[in-house]
């Protein structure tokens, strides 16, 4: 690949014609969690800049108004599947590859933007056929995610094979790689041998207009609390994301137990899916059901309203390779954040986060207790985090960076 100048140092004018972009999203786009938010906001930003984006994705998912979404046919033997890794995913990706080929031949894109490793594999092969560049949107290690989902034994032979495939996809197929964190850039350079000149950090961003701390009045907040049957006057600790063990949801329930034992009056508002009944039962078995509210799935359009109830937000995710975009929404809502001390969390929160050693639930609980005991700190920490989101994590700036990468390749 020819020498490239990092996108952050480029100051090019917009192209004379809109770019035709084929995004390949090997997931059920749109769903209200994680990487889907990144795909959605990147697409909206690029289209607002005048470019045309087509998204090739699985047959399930919500159709977002105004987006050009092409879906695979459903598998004849399997009409539903789990979030994350699944033994059926290979078949879904074969269907997606056929769809991407058909769309690529019809739309004749200027560039392919592949999300996740399957999207980069399909997009890389298609890009070679069409003789156009492919940008890999790297959101975390494939093998690490499969281990997190208990789908892959880290000591097994298959793990080594998948890791070799991941290295091939990351280093050999893309023309450029966008990473959701600086930590991911380091991982690609040191463990996957990706050329540093190909890597462009593009952290997740926040829509600071939609996620705003003053969306609801005090009266409206009280009304929503009553709807959710949360006692008035009790401080709320908010979490919004996937409900899985690797996201740290059991640690939140343990923290509720710990706060109760310490005599700290607080309420956990845990928003998201799947496995709601499983974790609700866990809370009941640990005698904290009256201190934890599970809302189930929250539509992305409604997320700011429900997050408005939070006095404190939490990030119990331990993964060292995946992004943690939910932090940006907490930051935009001006909420102080207690998080495990990982490189990704440090990248977003810097010195304005409250940290506990990764996996140390007791320390996590005590950080929450200390913060709850000092409500005068909430506004100060929250204001710093919102300002950080406004100045460093803007989708408008990210869109210019993406287009600069595209133009350098084209």
Image: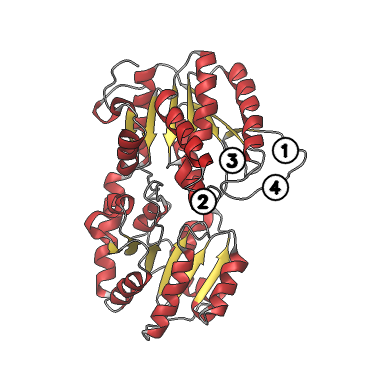
Crowding at mark 2 (Cα within 10 Å: few <14, some 14-19, many 20+): many
The residue positioned 50% from the left and 66% from the top of the image is 270
Q: Give whichever of discs 4 and 3 has the lower sequence position.
A: 3
User: Mark on residue 65?
Assistant: 3
- CA gap, disc 1 and disc 3: 22 Å
Q: Which residue is mark 4?
A: 80
Between circles 4 and 3, the one closer to the viewer is 4
Q: Is 234 drawn above or below residue 245 in the view shown?
A: below
User: Quick check: can you spot residue 335?
Assistant: no
Q: Nearer the viewer, residue 224 or 139?
A: 139
Instruction: Count how many numbered circles sit on residues in the image.
Output: 4
The quarter of the picture where residue 365 lies is: bottom left
Q: Which residue is mark 1?
A: 74
- CA gap, disc 2 and disc 3: 18 Å
Q: Give whichever of discs 4 and 1 has the lower sequence position.
A: 1
Quarter in which the N terminus is drawn: top left
Q: Is 138 drawn above or below residue 404 in the view shown?
A: below
Crowding at mark 1 (Cα within 10 Å: few <14, some 14-19, many 20+): some
The residue positioned 52% from the left and 71% from the top of the image is 224
Between circles 2 and 3, the one closer to the viewer is 2
The residue positioned 64% from the left and 43% from the top of the image is 87
- CA gap, disc 4 and disc 2: 18 Å
Q: Give whichever of discs 1 and 3 has the lower sequence position.
A: 3
Callouts 4 and 2 close, C-beta under 8 Å: no
Callouts 2 and 3 close, C-beta under 8 Å: no
- CA gap, disc 4 and disc 3: 23 Å
Residue 62 x/y as whole percent: 62, 45
Q: Which residue is mark 2?
A: 33
Residue farthest toward the right in the current orientation of the protein: 76
Tell me the colour scheme of the image. secondary structure
Q: Give whichever of discs 4 and 2 has the lower sequence position.
A: 2
């Amino acid at each position: 690949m020819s020498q490239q100048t990092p996108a952050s140092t480029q100051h090019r004018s917009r192209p004379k014609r809109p770019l035709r972009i084929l995004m390949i999203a090997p997931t059920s786009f749109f769903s209200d969690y994680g990487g889907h938010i990144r795909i959605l906001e990147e697409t909206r930003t690029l289209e607002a800049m005048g470019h045309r984006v087509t998204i090739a994705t699985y047959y399930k998912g919500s159709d977002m108004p105004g987006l050009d979404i092409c879906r695979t046919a459903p598998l004849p033997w399997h009409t539903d599947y789990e979030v994350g890794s699944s033994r059926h995913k290979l078949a879904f990706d074969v269907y997606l590859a056929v769809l991407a080929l058909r769309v690529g031949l019809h739309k004749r894109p200027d560039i392919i933007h592949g999300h996740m490793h399957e999207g980069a594999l399909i997009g890389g092969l298609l890009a070679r056929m069409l003789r156009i560049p492919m940008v890999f949107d790297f959101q975390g290690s494939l093998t690490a995610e499969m281990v997190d989902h208990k789908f892959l034994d880290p000591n097994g032979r298959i793990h080594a094979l998948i890791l070799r495939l991941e290295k091939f996809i990351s280093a050999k197929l893309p023309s450029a790689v966008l990473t959701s964190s600086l930590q991911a850039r380091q991982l690609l350079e040191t463990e996957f041998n990706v050329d540093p000149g190909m890597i462009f950090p593009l952290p997740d961003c926040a829509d600071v207009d939609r996620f705003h701390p003053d969306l609801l009045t005090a009266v409206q907040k009280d009304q929503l609390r009553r709807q959710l049957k949360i006692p008035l006057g009790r401080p709320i600790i908010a979490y919004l994301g996937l409900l899985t063990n690797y996201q740290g949801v059991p640690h939140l329930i343990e923290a509720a137990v710990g706060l109760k034992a310490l005599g700290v009056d607080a309420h956990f508002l845990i928003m998201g899916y799947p496995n709601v009944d499983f974790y609700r039962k866990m809370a009941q078995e640990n005698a904290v059901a009256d201190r934890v509210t599970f809302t189930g799935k929250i539509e992305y359009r409604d997320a700011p309203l429900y997050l408005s109830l939070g006095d404190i937000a939490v990030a119990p995710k331990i993964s060292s390779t995946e992004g943690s975009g939910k932090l940006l929404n907490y930051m935009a809502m001006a909420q102080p954040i207690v998080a495990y001390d990982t490189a990704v969390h440090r990248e977003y929160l810097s010195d304005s986060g409250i940290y506990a050693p990764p996996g140390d639930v007791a320390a996590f609980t005590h950080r929450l207790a200390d913060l709850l005991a000092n409500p005068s700190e909430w506004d100060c920490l929250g204001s710093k985090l919102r300002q950080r989101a406004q100045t460093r994590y803007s989708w408008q700036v990210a869109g210019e960076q993406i287009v600069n990468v595209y133009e350098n390749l084209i």
